[in-house]
Amino acid sequence: MKTSKKQSIAIIGGGASGIFASLRCAEVAKAKKIDVDIRVFEASTKFLKKVRISGGGRCNVTHNIFEVNAFCLNYPRGQKELLSPFQKFQATDTVKWFEERGVDLKHEDDGRMFPVTDNSETIIDCFMQEASKHEIKLLNKMNVKSLKKLGDGKISLFINDDESFIADSVLIATGSMPGGYHLAKNLGHSITEIAPSLFTFKIEDEILEGLSGTSFSQAALTLKIDGAKPFEQKGPLLITHWGLSGPALLKLSAWAAREMMHTNYKAIITINWLGIERQDDAEKLLKTIKNNNTKTSVGKAYPSELTKRFWLQLLIKCGISKEKNWSEISKKEFRLIVKNLFNCELNVLGKSRFKEEFVECGGINLKEINFKTMESKVCSRLYFSGEVMDIDGITGGFNFQSAWTSGWIAGNNMAHL
């Protein structure tokens, strides 16, 4: 005979992972005929804040890679640990989950997946309807200040200044909020070094002056940091008011997150603006332009993939007058143009936060979590999901996917018979 005793499930954090875990837990409890009281405690006034603003308000739900091993390669931290969870719930399952609830997803050329409505409210409405259907209690302005393990194995939550709640299972899904780390630490967990993971670079250099908004579709980047191996990345790059951004640069920042923090965000970045494979090829390209335009000024004949404004700034950096004809360019000047096109060195002076993503690396030590269930190895009945763990992905829907997957697995296991 099934137990009729109501189980109390407490989820701390009303973001993507916490809400998703609550929905899965409710589904599993219903299927197993377990009577549950599921409560989601959110410290702020609003639920699903990151979902609302991610992807420019469109919500980059996941990424269009449906092979688990390939998907895992997009996590600077957590790559190995996510292999097993993704076997149970991966991008394909995310697409199916939303479709079954009336939300169709589409993918863009770069692999990012969005709701076809291009509106994050579609995702939020879906979650809210599901939470209502399963009678999940969504409680805002509820700051869980501490947790205490009780003698009977349950966990007591102390909320705001004078409230408490006793739970059979607790999930910490607080993202990168310090409060979540504090709660876990007090129950015996260790926290790895925290560092911003997706950020843009502050760079002041004449080659970038007045070019905010200029983009390059296939730049190749190499980041050199004192005491670390070089980091490399290729893809779209964007010049901003303060330096550089764009997908390739954000990926670079994720892989080099801790190393950059240790050098106070000082480094040298080398840019191959056109992503040309070999220097010989860059020389050939410029030789062809030179030979075909001997009587044309260098300011008017340049690689077609570049904007004129960028080319003129590159000439300024080389100290070459745009009025000079190609036939007047010396070997030394030619080499200088090749260098700044193929191997342009810029000093990174600091970082700027990438507002849409604001991901942190670091969190609960992954050795202390059972990835089959997302339960703590240190404190029974305590679970983790999402960014509170030392897992982070590059930009492109990978952080949401690990939030859905870890939330789904935690939700699978929190209601016990």
Image: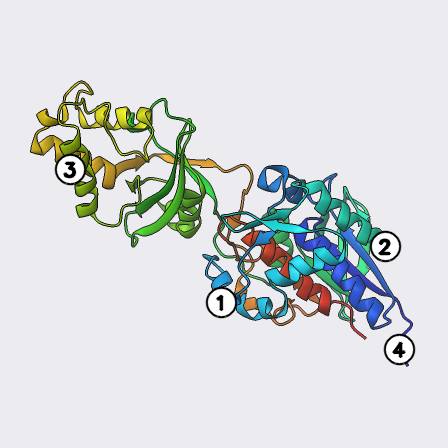
- Which element type, helix, strand or loop, lies under badge 2? helix
Q: Which residue corresponds to mark 1?
A: 69
Which residue does the image show at 51% across and 54% down from the upper left?
Answer: 393
Task: Identify the mark at residue 133; answer none if there is no mark.
Answer: 2
The quadrant holding residue 141 is top right
The quadrant holding residue 221 is top left
The answer to which of marks 1 and 2 sits earlier in the sequence is 1
Left or right? Give the position of 49 relative to 159.
Answer: left
Query: The residue under label 2 is which amino acid type?
Result: Lys
Measure the C-alpha gap from mark 3 to mark 4.
80 Å
Asked whether residue 159 is in view, the answer is no
Measure the C-alpha gap from mark 1 to mark 2.
35 Å
Q: Which residue corresponds to mark 4?
A: 2
Up-down relation of residue 362 to residue 296 (above or below): below
Left or right? Give the position of 133 relative to 224.
Answer: right
The answer to which of marks 2 and 4 sits earlier in the sequence is 4
Query: The residue under label 4 is which amino acid type?
Result: Lys
Which residue does the image show at 73% across and 61% down from the upper left?
Answer: 170
Q: Are marks 3 and 1 in contact (CB under 8 Å)?
A: no
Q: Give neighbour class at mark 3: few <14, some 14-19, many 20+ (Cα, 10 Å).
A: some
Q: Are marks 2 and 4 in contact (CB under 8 Å)?
A: no
Which mark is in front, 4 or 1?
1
Query: Of 86 and 267, which appears nearest the observer?
Result: 86
Which quadrant, please, contains the C terminus?
Answer: bottom right
The answer to which of marks 3 and 1 sits earlier in the sequence is 1
